[in-house]
Structures are given as C-alpha cells and as structure tokens.
Amino acid sequence: MDITSELIWVQCGSCPATSCLRYTPLDTTTFMPDLSRYVGCDTQYCQMVVPGVQPKCNSQYPACRYELDFYAADAIKPTWYTSGYLANETFNFDTASVAGIVFGCSDDITLPDLAGSSGFLGFNRGISPFWNWDEDGAPAAVGSRPKSQSTPLLAPTANQNPYYYVKLTGLLVDGQPLTSIPAGTFDAQADGSGGVYMSTTLPVTYLKEAAYNALRRELVSKIQSQGVIPVDTPGDLYHLCFLTQYFANAKVPTLALVFDCADATMELTVNNYFFDLAYGQTRMSILPSTDVSVLSTLPSSGQGSGSWHEPV
C-alpha cells in the first residue's frame, strides 16, 4: 500500500531477466491489454497521475506512460523504479466487480523486494475508483493497541499535495522536549509548503532543517559523551553515522514524536531511527528537508512500540 500515490500498479506481461525482476510465478497469466484498453496521454487521469510531458506519447505509441522512483535507506537519489503504461480493466473483489478501473501495467520493475506481492495500491487523497475521503479529518492512531492515542489526519489545503498530513508539534529526546526547535517549524504554510505528512514507501524520515539540526546536535552530544564519535565522511553533510562496533555498546537516547492531541506521543525504538549498513557503520534514518517534513512508516513497522494504524 502506497499512501502518497493514487496509482494502482501491478506487474504485467513478460519480464525478460535482462530488464526487470519478475514477481508473479512463470505459469501465472498476466494482463495483456489490447489497444482499446490503453489510457491515452491526453486524458485527465494521465495528466493527474503522470504530470508533465510524456516523451513516448505519439500516434504510434498512444498509451500514457509512467515511472515511479523508490529510494534505498542510504540513498539521496532514486535507487529503483517501476515503469509501464496506464490501462483499464474490471477488478473483482470477493463478490463485487468494479468496471473501468484505471491502473498501471508495469513492464519494467527493478525493485529488489516486494515482500511477496506483485504491485502496489495507491491510497492517497487524490482521485480514486474505490474510495472517498472524509475531508473533516479521520483519526490516525499512534501507539500500540489496546492503549493507543490518536491524532486526526488533516485534510490537505488547495495548495498542498493529496497526502495524509498530521499535526506534529515537537520531539522528545530521553523524555525531554527539544526546546531549541523554533515555534512553527512543522506548520503548513498558505502556499502549500511545510507541514508534515506520512509515507509508506520512503525508507527514511525527513524533518525540516531546524528540527533536524536540533535533533542531530542533541543525539551527537549524548552519544559522544560516551566516547562514541560520529564518522567524518568528507562531502557528506546529511547523514549521521557511527562505527557499528562502538555504537552497539552505547546507550542511545530515546526519541519520541509529539502530536497535537492530549498525550498523543509515539515512542520509537533505536531500530526506528538508526540502521546498520553493510560496511560497518550505523546510520540515522532521519534526514533534513528544506520544505516539508515526511514521517516514514517503514522504520516503525513491527519493530517496537511505535506503529501507525487506523483504529477499529
């Protein structure tokens, strides 16, 4: 499930070993549309899902092409992608059928692991053939059942992307508020910039620079006081890294996210904000942003007390 995209995409057609990875079994029938099922480049759906110029759109190639990028946890630039074209088909769900569903037919997938699945369902607040969203703000639970607290999902303004925004108000390190974060750091601006939204596909969390710098200073101070100093990597001004052999013996400060609701605090474990690299370093999975803050749900999936879910 991808909550920052409205595109549904699955693997379609053949997949030569030289061009992409195949996730469906070799004897599985895949969707091969005829020309009548292509979604054209001049359609509203194509322009909304795949904005900008489509270089392959012409009379000989009428289908709307797309490419979605994905990032590794230690990458600044896209690491993998999936690309294909838009088509429409009838989708069957248990006893119900929905005709004319527009979805992405991926014919090139370089993602190394989809956890046994062969595609994504896009669940953002944009146009969708399946669901309508409550613009008054539905609750998102923060914590672990049964004693979870909740904070509302904020409806995006006219100038914001159709994502799931939340009201993050601050950070706690070892239970103490980071008071050096300027007031309003996490606020959304009238022009659509700023704010805080959630992502199920980004492997790292992004914090507005002022918040990131305050958090980084506090973590470095507490960890360095134990004799564990950061790795100095020339030219890398973004990643906070330590040698794993020393970091493993350090008492890592606790980190919690504070939301705009009474006692709505998400306490994270070390695995939620630090991860080990293959070459003997441990890196913080939080990076600075000059604009919006993005809370990744991936680092907290089943790895401790912090979790995201919709209450029942």
Image (cartoon, helix red, strand yellow):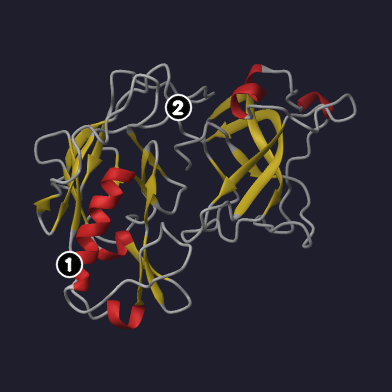
Element type at mark 1:
helix
Q: Residue at x 81, y 33 (%)?
A: 56
Q: In the visual, does 59 lie left or right of 300?
A: right
The circle on residue 264 is: none
Q: Quadrant of the C terminus?
A: top left
Between tags 2 and 1, which lies in front?
Answer: 1
In this rendering, the count of numbered labels is 2
Element type at mark 2:
loop
Q: In the visual, does 278 lie left or right of 42?
A: left
Structural crowding at the residue carrying mark 2, measured as other residues with C-alpha within 10 Å and reported as few (<14), some (14–19) or many (≥20): some
Q: Is residue 254 above or below residue 209?
A: below
Q: Mark 1 — residue?
A: 222
| Residue 236: quadrant of the picture | bottom left
Q: Residue at x 19, y 65 (%)?
A: 221
Q: Residue at x 17, y 33 (%)?
A: 260
Disc 2 marks a residue whose amino acid type is Asn
Q: In the visual, does 48 lie left or right of 155?
A: right
Residue 195 in the image: state x and y as whole percent.
32, 32
Task: Tell which of 302 and 97 is nearer to you.
Answer: 302
Can you name the residue that lies furthest to the right here?
60
| Camera sees residue 2 | yes
Residue 91 in the image: state x and y as whole percent.
61, 31
Disc 1 marks a residue whose amino acid type is Lys
Q: Mark 2 — residue?
A: 161
Can you name the residue that lies furthest to the front here?
234
| Camera sees residue 312 | no
Structural crowding at the residue carrying mark 1, measured as other residues with C-alpha within 10 Å and reported as few (<14), some (14–19) or many (≥20): some
Q: Is residue 48 above or below residue 233?
A: above
Q: Who comes first in sequence, dot 2 or dot 1? A: 2
Q: In the visual, does 230 lie left or right of 214?
A: right
| Residue 135: quadrant of the picture | top left
